[in-house]
Image (cartoon, rainbow, N blue to C red):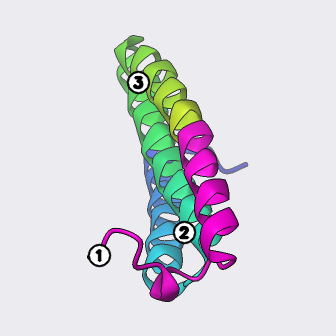
Amino acid sequence: MMEITLSHYLLLSAVIFTIGVVGVLTRRNILIIMMSVELMLNSANLTLIAFSHYLQNIDGMIFVFFTMTVAAAEVGVGLAIVMTIFRNKETLDVANLNILRN
Protein backbone atom coordinates (compact mmCIF):
# COMPACT_ATOMS: atom_id res chain seq x y z
CA MET A 1 0.00 0.00 0.00
CA MET A 2 1.27 3.45 -0.92
CA GLU A 3 1.98 5.91 1.88
CA ILE A 4 0.97 9.55 1.53
CA THR A 5 4.09 11.68 1.91
CA LEU A 6 4.80 15.37 2.25
CA SER A 7 5.31 15.72 -1.49
CA HIS A 8 1.76 14.49 -2.13
CA TYR A 9 0.34 17.23 0.08
CA LEU A 10 2.57 19.85 -1.53
CA LEU A 11 1.53 18.73 -5.01
CA LEU A 12 -2.16 18.92 -4.05
CA SER A 13 -1.59 22.35 -2.55
CA ALA A 14 0.17 23.54 -5.72
CA VAL A 15 -2.71 22.28 -7.88
CA ILE A 16 -5.31 24.02 -5.70
CA PHE A 17 -3.27 27.24 -5.70
CA THR A 18 -2.93 27.09 -9.48
CA ILE A 19 -6.69 26.65 -9.88
CA GLY A 20 -7.17 29.71 -7.66
CA VAL A 21 -4.70 31.82 -9.67
CA VAL A 22 -6.33 30.82 -12.95
CA GLY A 23 -9.72 31.71 -11.50
CA VAL A 24 -8.53 35.16 -10.42
CA LEU A 25 -6.86 35.89 -13.74
CA THR A 26 -9.55 34.61 -16.10
CA ARG A 27 -12.91 35.23 -14.44
CA ARG A 28 -14.77 38.52 -14.52
CA ASN A 29 -17.41 37.83 -11.85
CA ILE A 30 -16.29 39.25 -8.52
CA LEU A 31 -17.85 36.37 -6.54
CA ILE A 32 -15.85 33.81 -8.53
CA ILE A 33 -12.71 35.90 -7.97
CA MET A 34 -13.35 35.91 -4.22
CA MET A 35 -13.85 32.14 -4.24
CA SER A 36 -10.57 31.77 -6.14
CA VAL A 37 -8.78 33.85 -3.51
CA GLU A 38 -10.24 31.54 -0.85
CA LEU A 39 -8.85 28.55 -2.78
CA MET A 40 -5.41 30.14 -2.70
CA LEU A 41 -5.68 30.75 1.05
CA ASN A 42 -6.78 27.16 1.63
CA SER A 43 -3.85 25.84 -0.38
CA ALA A 44 -1.49 27.89 1.77
CA ASN A 45 -3.19 26.46 4.87
CA LEU A 46 -2.75 22.93 3.52
CA THR A 47 0.95 23.60 3.02
CA LEU A 48 1.30 24.94 6.56
CA ILE A 49 -0.46 21.93 8.04
CA ALA A 50 1.57 19.48 5.94
CA PHE A 51 4.87 21.00 7.06
CA SER A 52 3.66 21.24 10.64
CA HIS A 53 2.80 17.55 10.64
CA TYR A 54 6.04 16.60 8.87
CA LEU A 55 8.21 18.58 11.31
CA GLN A 56 6.15 17.51 14.36
CA ASN A 57 5.67 21.17 15.29
CA ILE A 58 2.35 22.75 16.23
CA ASP A 59 3.30 26.32 15.19
CA GLY A 60 2.03 25.86 11.63
CA MET A 61 -1.33 24.60 12.83
CA ILE A 62 -1.72 27.57 15.17
CA PHE A 63 -0.91 29.92 12.30
CA VAL A 64 -3.62 28.21 10.22
CA PHE A 65 -6.23 29.14 12.84
CA PHE A 66 -5.22 32.79 12.55
CA THR A 67 -5.32 32.58 8.75
CA MET A 68 -8.80 31.04 8.83
CA THR A 69 -9.99 33.83 11.13
CA VAL A 70 -8.67 36.50 8.78
CA ALA A 71 -10.22 34.67 5.79
CA ALA A 72 -13.61 34.56 7.50
CA ALA A 73 -13.44 38.28 8.23
CA GLU A 74 -12.38 38.92 4.63
CA VAL A 75 -15.39 37.02 3.33
CA GLY A 76 -17.76 38.97 5.56
CA VAL A 77 -16.37 42.36 4.58
CA GLY A 78 -15.96 41.36 0.93
CA LEU A 79 -19.53 40.16 0.58
CA ALA A 80 -20.83 43.35 2.19
CA ILE A 81 -18.83 45.39 -0.33
CA VAL A 82 -20.06 43.22 -3.21
CA MET A 83 -23.68 43.64 -2.11
CA THR A 84 -23.27 47.42 -1.90
CA ILE A 85 -21.66 47.57 -5.35
CA PHE A 86 -24.40 45.36 -6.80
CA ARG A 87 -27.12 47.58 -5.36
CA ASN A 88 -25.52 50.66 -6.93
CA LYS A 89 -24.28 49.30 -10.27
CA GLU A 90 -26.54 46.21 -10.74
CA THR A 91 -23.61 44.18 -12.07
CA LEU A 92 -20.84 42.01 -10.65
CA ASP A 93 -18.64 42.19 -13.75
CA VAL A 94 -15.29 43.67 -12.70
CA ALA A 95 -14.79 45.24 -16.14
CA ASN A 96 -17.85 47.43 -15.56
CA LEU A 97 -16.90 48.47 -12.03
CA ASN A 98 -15.20 51.85 -12.18
CA ILE A 99 -16.54 53.05 -8.84
CA LEU A 100 -13.17 54.39 -7.61
CA ARG A 101 -12.46 56.47 -10.71
CA ASN A 102 -13.29 60.16 -10.93
Q: Percent x, y for residue 6? A: 45, 43
Question: Considering only vertical position in the picture, is 45 above or below 89?
Answer: above
Q: The disc labelled 2 sits on which kind of residue?
A: Ile
Q: Secondary structure at mark 1?
A: loop
Residue 33 in magenta stretch: no
Which of the 4 quarters of the picture holds residue 16? Answer: bottom right
Q: Which residue appears at 58% of the width and 83% of the height? A: 93
Q: Which residue appears at 47% of the width and 26% of the height? A: 64
Alpha-carbon distance for marks 2 and 3? 29 Å
Alpha-carbon distance for marks 1 and 3? 44 Å
Q: The disc labelled 1 sits on which kind of residue?
A: Arg
- The answer to which of 82 and 40 lies nearer the viewer is 82
- The residue that disc 2 covers is 33
- The residue that disc 3 covers is 52
Question: Considering only vertical position in the picture, is 67 above or below 29?
Answer: above
Crowd tier of the residue under label 2, counting other residues whose Cα lies within 10 Å: few below 14, some 14–19, many 20 or above: many
Q: Secondary structure at mark 2?
A: helix
Please give left or right for residue 39 compared with residue 14 in the image: right
Q: Secondary structure at mark 3?
A: helix
- N-terminal of the pair, mark 1 or mark 2, is 2
User: Comparing marks 2 and 3, which lies closer to the viewer?
Assistant: 2
Residues under numbered marks 1 and 3 in contact, where contact means CB atoms less than 8 Å apart: no
Alpha-carbon distance for marks 1 and 2? 21 Å
Q: Which residues are magenta?
A: 75-102
Q: Percent x, y for residue 21? A: 43, 72
Q: The disc labelled 3 sits on which kind of residue?
A: Ser
Residue 100 in magenta stretch: yes
- The residue that disc 1 covers is 101
Q: How many marks?
A: 3
